[in-house]
Image (spheres, coloured by chain):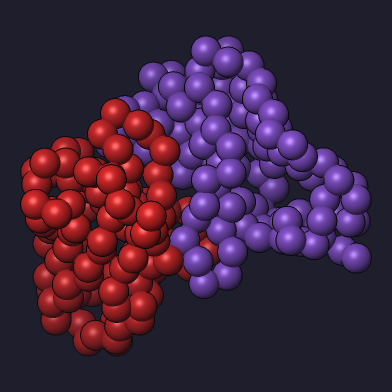
Amino acid sequence: ETGVTQSPTHLIKTRGQQVTLRCSSQSGHNTVSWYQQALGQGPQFIFQYYREEENGRGNFPPRFSGLQFPNYSSELNVNALELDDSALYLCASSLAGNEKLFFGSGTQLSVL
Amino acid sequence: GENVEQHPSTLSVQEGDSAVIKCTYSDSASNYFPWYKQELGKGPQLIIDIRSNVGEKKDQRIAVTLNKTAKHFSLHITETQPEDSAVYFCAAHSSASKIIFGSGTRLSIRP
């Protein structure tokens, strides 16, 4: 059984650029959630995907968007990067209807 | 808006002593309360959880208590060991897609 994997592990971008982060869910899991974790803070829910559709969204602007693919992997896209977007981005997979989340190690994004 | 408050933000205990971390939630619709442990360079790992119809749950040295009336829940770690050093997060779920995390507690175990 493979765990949740995220790529890349680290990324440096400049303000105004666009970024795509990737996540492979744990084997057998069909739901993927994305979180933003600022330094010294708890994770903040961005959105969740199930059956390739957004299934809930936190308080994030539309420039944060996502995709889920038929194999349940997922992408997080952020447009028009701002300095405050610098954070650890975590992906978590789960089974639909089960609240237990299994997190990847995250992508550390730095916006300069 | 809805939030989860977590205290203390840092906690240092002697190896072998107990550690207690407390959380308070505001959304009365919350019904699932997990606790996560996050080590440096890793994502959060679920260590124990409790549902709103249960008052207490224990797993070896770790226990969680829930007071629905007061909207409080707590993590108790007994006989602490060096490997317990990490950042711990509580969370409250009111739906599959509405999850709020606390701000974390950095636990240090002194040898």
Q: From the viewer's side, name the closer residue of A80 and B79.
A: B79
The x, y position of residue B100, in whole percent, is: 41, 40
Q: What residue is rendered at 47% in x and 61% in y?
A: B43
The quadrant holding residue A51 is top left
Q: Is residue B4 above or below residue B69?
A: below
Q: Quarter holding the N terminus of chain A?
A: bottom left
Q: Is residue A18 above or below residue A34?
A: below
Chain that appears purple: B
Whether residue A8 can be seen here: yes
Q: How many marks?
A: 0
Q: Quadrant of residue B1?
A: top left
Q: Is residue B27 visible?
A: no
Q: Which chain is red?
A: A
Residue at the image position 22 percent from the left and 43 percent from the top:
A30
Residue A80, x across and y down, in percent: 13, 73
* Residue A27 spot, x, y in % from top left: 30, 52
Vertical arrangement, residue B90 with respect to residue A92, above or below = above
